[in-house]
Image (tube, grey):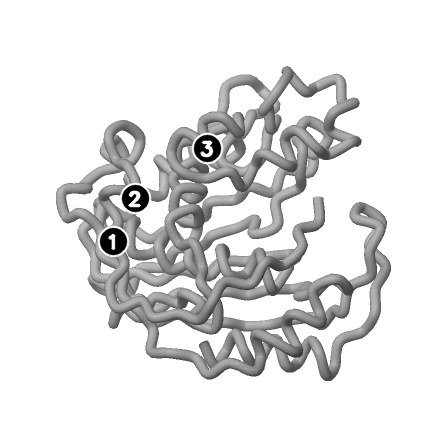
Amino acid sequence: MKQYLDLCHRLIQQGHWVENERTGKRCLTVINADMVYDVQNNQLPLLTTRKSFWKSAIAELLGYLRGYDNAADFRAIGTKTWDANANENGAWLNNPHRKGVDDMGRVYGVQGRGWRKPDGGSVDQLRKLVDDLSRGVDDRGEILSFYNPGEFHMGCLRPCMHTHNFSLLGDRLYLTSYQRSCDVPLGLVFNQVQVFAFLKIIAQITGHKPGQAFHKIVNAHIYEDQIELMRDVQLQREPYELPQLHINPDIKSLEDLETWVTMADFEVSGYQFHDPIQYPFSV
C-alpha cells in the first residue's frame, strides 16, 4: 500500500501534463515506477483505501493464460474488463480484422499461446516456460510476451503489461513484469494483483516456492477526470493491513488452469477496505 500511495502522491505533485490522442484527455504522467510484491509471505497487494474487485483481476489473468480472444469468454469466467475495448473502441469497430461482437483480435493471451511464426505454425510461449520450470530449468529466457508489433493492427488494444520474465534460483521462483503504460487509479489496481497471482500460480503448478514479484512501469499516469477523486478522497484515507491470497492446492498443471479452474478456486482472507470509488474509465 505504501508503494501505491507513494506513486499516487508522486503523480499529483510531480506529474507532467501529457495529451492522450486515443482518449482525447490529458494525463498527469511520470516515467518509471518500480513496485515489489512479497509473494513469499503471501502479502497480496490488494488496495485497501478503496474496495477493489480482485476476482475480476484474476479472472482476466486466467483468460490470458487460456489464450482467449473474445470478451464473452472473459465474461463467462467472471470479468467484463474487455467489453468496452472489444465493442466501444471506434477504431476497432471499423477494423476489417474484427470478426464481430465481442471479438478482441490478436491481443494478450492469443500472442502468449499462439505467436505466429513467419515460416508457419505458432509458438506456445506459456507451455514452453511451464515445461522448463517444471523440470527445474531456467534458460534465462523464461519469458511470456504479448507484445507483437507485427499484429497490432489485428487487435483492439496494444498490450499495456506486455512481458513477464520468470527466474529460478534454487527452488524459489521470481517474476519480473514489464508494463509500458498504466492508468494508476484503475489499471494498476488490477495489474498488481495479476503480477502477484501469476507468480503464485506458476510457482504452484511447477513445484516451486514463490519469491518476490517485481513490477516495472514505464509510463504511469492519472487522467484529468480522476485527479479530484484521487487527491481529495482516496489519498485522505488510512490503509489497512494487506490480505492474503489462497489458491486451491489441487491446481497442479497448466491443463488444470485450461480446463476446470474457476474463480471458486481462489480466495482472499483478511481483506479490510474503505468504500469503493467510481473512477471514470477511458476507452
Residue, disc 2: 132
Q: Quadrant of the C terminus?
A: top right
User: Which numbered disc flags the more N-terminal residue, 3 or 2?
Assistant: 3
Residue extending furthest toward the left: 250
Residue type, label 1: Glu
Rendered image quadrant of residue 15: bottom right
Residue hosting label 1: 267
Distance Cα–Cα, label 2 vs label 1: 28 Å
Which type of secondary structure does the marked residue at label 3 adopt?
helix
Residue assigned mark 3: 74
Q: Secondary structure at mark 1?
A: strand
Q: CB of mark 3 within 8 Å of CB of mark 1?
A: no
Residue 237 spot, x, y in % from top left: 51, 81
Name the residue located 52 percent from the left edge and 44 percent from the top edge. 145
Nearest to viewer (mark 2 / mark 1): 1
For the residue pair 61 and 227, the one nearer the viewer reads as: 227
Residue 17 position by quadrant: bottom right
Does residue 150 appear in the picture of this structure? no
**Do the residues under discs 3 and 2 have CB atoms within 8 angstroms?**
no
Residue 61: percent from the left, percent from the top? 42, 44
In this view, the mark in front (3 or 2):
3
User: Could you say which is closer to the camera, residue 1 or residue 167?
Assistant: 1
174 displayed left or right of 1: left
Name the amino acid, label 2: Asp
Q: Secondary structure at mark 2?
A: helix
Dot 2: few (<14), some (14–19), or many (≥20) neighbours within 10 Å? some
Q: CA distance from mark 3 to mark 1?
A: 19 Å
